[in-house]
Amino acid sequence: MSVGAAPPTIETLDDAAVTRLRADFPILGTNVGGRPLVYLDSGATSQRPLAVIDAERDFAMHRNAAVHRGAHHLAVEATEAFEQARSSVARFVGADDDEIVWTANATEGFNLVAYSLGAGSLQGDGPIVFAPGDEIVVTEMEHHANLIPWQQLAARVGATLRFIPITDGEVLDLDAARTVIGPRTKLLAFTHVSNVLGVVNPVDGLVALARGAGALVMLDACQSAPHLPLDLHALDVDFAAFSSHKMLGPTGIGVLYGKRDLLNSMPPFITGGSMITTVTMERAEFLPAPQRFEAGSQPIAQAVGLDAAVRYLDEVGLDAVHEWEAALGQRLVEGLARVPGIRVVGPGPGAARVGLAAFDVDGVHAHDVGQFLDDRGIAVRVGHHCAQPLHRRLGVAATTRASAYLYTTTDEVDEFLDAVAGVRAYFGAGA
């Protein structure tokens, strides 16, 4: 396979197709303690195919240079590769090139929007001018990256932070959303897919409520962009953020989407470098987006790697990925539901969910569950998954989360389920 090449187009994923794909992921051949690795922590970070690894290596060996700054051959090639990556990502999520801003990660994307909206408001020239009593609305299922920046913004501008709760069925309470989102709402920020509950939130309905209130919308796409087809223009959100490392790409780069007019009306988040038009000793003028938000040296090799990642996902097909992961998610939930003493959080078997399941084991702390599974070569995530308020609402301090991706087989899910069935007996909790 050539550098940056992707697998042949796959219309449907099944175990045979997934087994062939796994040959592209060398780390999946790892043994842990003498057992084949079962990697079920893709919700935290995904593994990289050779196409991504090779693309980064090829860039470092043959095209490495600063972008947008040099006139020499390497600089031109590096700049072309860097901007080609922006075009690929824009196409991948249904956006225009100048609406894609590179960030260090998704968290920086949320902070960028929160800081810039706040700074523009305080200067009186941003797309939102907050007044005391104005409201910023989030949901009870947000992870910290899409919660704390809004807490901080509310504190800076005197706004009130409000919450859309979850129901006792552990999905978003849409009836409550209709009362929480109102005339004072200036911004609604919510996750597309919960990293704990596994549910897909109804973007259309929430955007409609926000538009009725005249509010801006920020979408947390960290757990959706890697796993299901996304068309940000069609969804009509104003901003969205997601991370490369959760979608087969490198760490150290994230993506912020913003509508062009909004981005160009917001002050920069970080300043310096080549994001300017003119600079005097007293003041500076800034380029339009996306460069106005890309101060300093850029994550060039990471962008090239992300380009290879989205090409790979494109070739496999996000529809096929989503369908496969939804089936794995059902297999996870149905299997866990059969294990005595296990409580799966989020909707139960039969309800739509993505390929992840978080659960509590009666009488056994999640960290012990994780260690038990690791001893059997199974990698999962344990803790509060950067969603402490949600875990508090669920009445648990921590959960264990298994999260699949396009390279996960049904045999791996079954091996995980067999192992979980032995947890309580091992710790003497099932007696």
Image: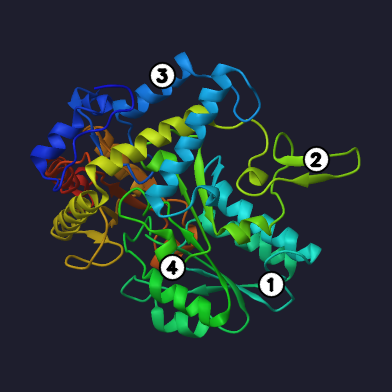
Please tell me whether residue 387 is drawn above or below residue 294 in the rendered image. Answer: below
Which residue was labeled with disc 4?
A: 393
Q: What residue would you read off at disc 1?
A: 159
What residue is disc 2 on? 278
Foreground: disc 2 or disc 3: 2
Q: Earlier in the sequence, mark 3 or mark 4?
A: 3
Within 10 Å of the Cα at label 4, are there few (<14), some (14-19), or many (20+) other Cα atoms? some
Q: CA distance from mark 4 to mark 1?
A: 24 Å
Q: Amino acid at mark 2?
A: Thr
Position of the N terminus by quadrant: top left
**Outermost residue toward the top?**
61
Q: Quadrant of residue 16?
A: top left
Mark 3 lies on a secondary structure that is: helix
> Which residue is depicted at the point 31% across and 27% down?
51
Is residue 40 something one can see in this rendering?
A: no
Give percent across and percent down for residue 188: 54, 70
Alpha-carbon distance for marks 2 and 3? Answer: 35 Å
Q: What residue is rendered at 43% in x and 55% in y?
A: 221
Q: Pick whichever of labels 4 and 2 is earlier in the sequence.
A: 2
Q: Of label 4 and label 1, which has the lower sequence position? A: 1
Neighbor class of circle 1 (other Cα within 10 Å; few <14, some 14-19, many 20+) is many
Separation (CA) of disc 4 from disc 2: 51 Å
The colour scheme used here is rainbow
Compared across the picture, whether 298 is left or right of 400 comes to: right
- Residue annotated with mark 3: 58
Image depth: mark 4 or mark 1 in front: 1
